Image (tube, grey):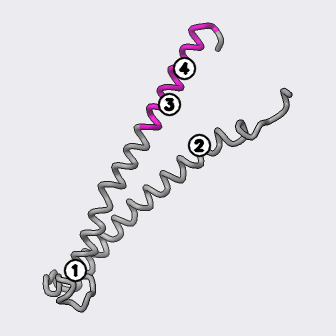
Amino acid sequence: MRGCVTAARLTSLPMAGYRRAVKYLIRFLLLMLGVALTTLGLVYWQSRGFSLEGMLLFDNGWRPHPIHILALGISLIPPSLWEIFVLEAAAKAARERTDGALTAQERLGDG
């Protein structure tokens, strides 16, 4: 039974790394989307001469004004940054826990 690899051992470590990587990817994609929408809103608004005309949707034939795009982009940036910081803090805490566990084993003379 020593050479037998169980499904739990096979999937526990790599999947945690993949899940963390996917979480980071999604958060960074949301951050990139926020920056892209902010840039698009500013460029589009500049092309319209920074006019506030047609800012109300019902006044503009239900077309979004560049300020709407700009506001959407700006509103995406803080939550995505916060989620990245939360992931970093959790990873740091996990590293500290494992480092602490290794030093405790070293004190016992096991490592």
For label 2, the residue is: 16
Cα gap from disc 1 to disc 4, whole angstroms: 55 Å
Cα gap from disc 4 to disc 3, whole angstroms: 10 Å
For label 1, the residue is: 45
Q: Earlier in the sequence, mark 3 or mark 1?
A: 1
Residue at image position (17%, 83%) is: 56
Q: Earlier in the sequence, mark 4 or mark 2?
A: 2
**Which disc, if any, is residue 35?**
none
* SS for callout 3: helix
Please state which of residues 47 and 70 is positioned toward the viewer in this rendering.
70
Residue type at mark 2 is Ala
Q: Earlier in the sequence, mark 1 or mark 4?
A: 1
Cα gap from disc 3 to disc 2, whole angstroms: 14 Å
Cα gap from disc 4 to disc 2, whole angstroms: 19 Å
Magenta stretch encompasses residue 105: yes
Specify the quadrant that holds the N terminus. Answer: top right
User: Which segment did they paint magenta?
Assistant: 90-109
State yes or no: discs 4 and 2 in contact (Cβ < 8 Å). no
Q: Position of residue 15 (x, y in %)?
A: 63, 45
Dividing the picture into quadrants, the one containing residue 53 is bottom left
**Which disc, if any, is residue 101?**
4
Q: Main secondary structure of the magenta part?
A: helix
Q: Categorize mark 1 by other alpha carbons within 10 Å: few (<14), some (14-19), many (20+).
A: some
For label 3, the residue is: 95
State yes or no: discs 1 and 2 in contact (Cβ < 8 Å). no
